Amino acid sequence: MNVLLQTKMAPYVTHLHKGVEIMGLREKGIAFLDKITTKAGYVNEWIIVRDAETSPDYGVLPYERPLSDLIKFGVINLDKPPGPTSHEVVAWIKKMFNVEKAGHGGTLEL
Amino acid sequence: MLPIGLANSTKVIGNVVHSIKEYVMVVQLHDSVDRKKLEEVVEYFKGQIYQKPPLRSSVKRAIRVKTVYDIEILDQQGRYLLLRVLCDPGTYMRKLAHDMGLILGVGAHMRELRRTRTGPFKEDETMVTLQEVSEALYMWRNMGDERYLRKIILPVEVSTAHLPKIIVLDTAVDALAHGADLAAPGVAMLTKNVEAGKTVAIYTLKGELVALGKALKNSEEIAKMDKDVVVKTSRVIMPRNVYPKCWKAKKGLSG
């Protein structure tokens, strides 16, 4: 069971499936966004404008992406070693993952 | 720490440059200073400060106002000071150390600097070394074990978690994926901090990042609108044709 789903999301609509309360796909998506926002140090105060569901026929919950997509839409929080430049490190990461592009979130300006 | 975006994440990783930063730095004072005086001066530097970028910088050298949200004295040993600083992007720590030295009257300079937070990214259990990345890749490629990679690679959505958010209906996704702006009827939910002129992150109801854009209205206005553009799309992440096409090409355009 994915760790992200273990907290009970009280305000969200759940429904019964064979007598067991489960979280809908939309609820899981919003719970995921709330979880990562809290982790980042912020809180989402939602305004619901249009009530809608999301179809399981396309798209995927971000934490259920197959590995190749996890890499294509992935980010690494790297503890950069002090020697090489950020540019060099990104070049290494590109080679290691065999991806065409990679970028960093700002060099350290001394 | 350095957040790195892989492949498609490259398009959005740059947005964390404009987010809150936290640093830990070693400041060397040029003479000994009373702890009480030190604490007073540190307090003085909290809040809004003026800075002019140094000679060796890539930005225009005009005086700028930056906010220092917090400074904490982590340790003091003789003339060495260990400080934690939480501040606006673009705040120069070297200049802060120098100016503290001026106010203290003894002079000071920054000896060592480490960035410990870049927007949503902190030095926590998600931070990994190159060694760990290499080992995780090895486990996957040579042992067929994905679990290590899954622990170290974060979904791109994490890199925009600090931004105001708009969640769109499934029917609005593919148009956005083709670069269209977001119109009011496509909005399902949004956070109260969506502000005109500021960057917003657009997601699906499953939590997938669709695009980044600039909001044209505030959240309360958007919630009441039933037509017109509400976000100017700038960076698209969602690939085309993943969500169903529910839009028509404009007259006069091909394809």
Image (cartoon, coloured by chain):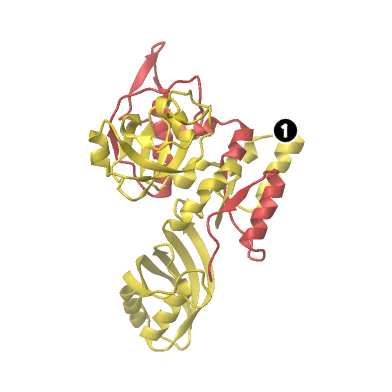
Chain colours: A red, B yellow
Q: Residue at x 41, y 76 (%)?
A: B52
Secondary-structure class at tag 1: loop
Q: Nearer the viewer, residue A108 or B227?
A: B227
Q: Is residue B19 above or below residue A45?
A: below
Is any atom of residue A7 visible in this view? Answer: no
Residue B11: where, in percent of width, then height?
53, 46
Q: Which residue is mark 1?
A: B144
Q: Crowdedness of circle 1 by 10 Å Cα count: few (<14), some, many (20+)?
A: few
Q: Residue furthest right?
A: B142
Residue A46, image x, y percentages: 30, 37
Residue under the image location 39 percent in, 68 percent down: B72
- Nearer the observer, B94 or A41: B94
Instruction: Give the residue drawn at x 63%, y 53%.
Output: B129
Q: Is residue A14 above or below residue B239?
A: above
Measuring from the top left, give residue B202's x and y in whole percent.
41, 38
Q: Say above or below: B223 vs B19.
A: above
Answer with left or right where residue A46 lies relative to residue A28: left
Q: Can residue B168 be seen?
A: yes
Mark 1: amino acid: Gly
Residue situated in front as seen by the camera: B41 or B59: B59
In the displayed image of the protein, which residue is found farthest to the top?
A18
Q: Position of residue B150 (x, y in %)?
A: 60, 38
In the image: residue B59, left or right of residue A10: right
